């Protein structure tokens, strides 16, 4: 009897793993996404940056990216980022390059496991139809928390 229970458990587990793999490969397994910080700064950045932080020191460095001037000064140096439990969570984020269009923004829309990687879908935009924008340099950023993983992370920009 024990052997029969073990065999049926093993067959059930194999079916579950097969189903999980087919879902992950076909369309992706959606991951929970919790927004940690979304804002913009007046710091001028030439290049967009995509970050993955799995430790508090990596998170602090990522958090400083949109706040650090070209001269190395950190704006808001007295404040600190929201802390997370890095044993179960990691932070991913997008810091867009600066734009002189005050309506520029970025939003991480979703995270999913697809085949052998985590895909972060984000939307970055500038002036939308009907929006009135100021002429101001703006560097938008968005950081989110997702479940910790050893898989590589890929960022894909959604077409809007």
Image (spheres, rainbow, N blue to C red):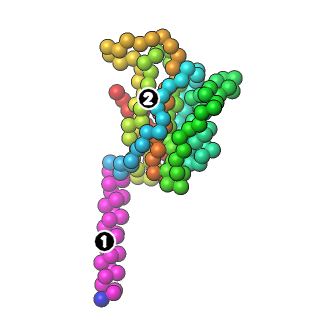
Q: CA distance from mark 2 to mark 1?
A: 42 Å
In the depicted structure, whether residue 5 falls above or below residue 98: below
Characterize the local packing of mark 1: few (<14), some (14-19) or many (20 or more) Cα atoms within 10 angstroms. few
The residue where tag 2 is placed is: 106
In the depicted structure, whether residue 35 falls above or below residue 77: below
Q: Residue at x 53, y 16 (%)?
A: 137
Residue 150 appears in view:
no
Residue 66 appears in view:
yes
- Residue 95: x and y in percent read 52, 31
Disc 2 + disc 1, Cβ < 8 Å: no
Residue lying at the far right of the rendered structure: 71
Magenta region: 2-26
Residue lying at the far front of the rendered structure: 78
Q: Which secondary structure class fits the magenta region best?
A: helix
Magenta segment includes 9? yes
Characterize the local packing of mark 2: few (<14), some (14-19) or many (20 or more) Cα atoms within 10 angstroms. many
> Between tags 2 and 1, which lies in front?
2
Magenta segment includes 127? no
Identify the disc placed on residue 122: none
Q: Residue at x 45, y 51 (%)?
A: 147
- Residue 75: x and y in percent read 62, 26
The residue where tag 1 is placed is: 12
Q: Return the residue nearer the eye: 27 or 133.
A: 133
Q: Return the residue nearer the eye: 21 or 37.
A: 37
- Residue 2: x and y in percent read 33, 87
Quadrant location, the C terminus:
top left
- Residue 150: x and y in percent read 52, 54
Q: Residue at x 44, y 29 (%)?
A: 106
């Amino acid at each position: 009897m024990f052997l029969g229970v073990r065999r049926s458990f093993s067959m059930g587990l194999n079916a579950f793993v097969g189903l999980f793999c087919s879902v992950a490969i076909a369309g992706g397994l959606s991951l929970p996404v919790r927004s940690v910080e979304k804002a913009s700064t007046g710091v001028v950045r030439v290049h967009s940056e995509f970050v993955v932080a799995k430790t508090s020191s990596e998170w602090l460095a990522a958090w400083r990216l949109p706040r650090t001037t070209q001269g190395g000064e950190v704006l808001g140096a007295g404040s600190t980022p929201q802390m997370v439990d890095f044993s179960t969570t990691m932070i991913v984020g997008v810091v867009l390059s600066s734009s002189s269009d005050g309506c520029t923004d970025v939003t991480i829309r979703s995270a999913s496991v697809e085949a052998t990687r985590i895909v972060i879908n984000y939307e970055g935009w500038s002036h939308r139809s009907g929006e009135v924008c100021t002429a101001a340099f703006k560097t938008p950023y968005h950081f989110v928390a997702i479940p910790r993983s050893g898989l590589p992370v890929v960022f894909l920009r959604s077409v809007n």
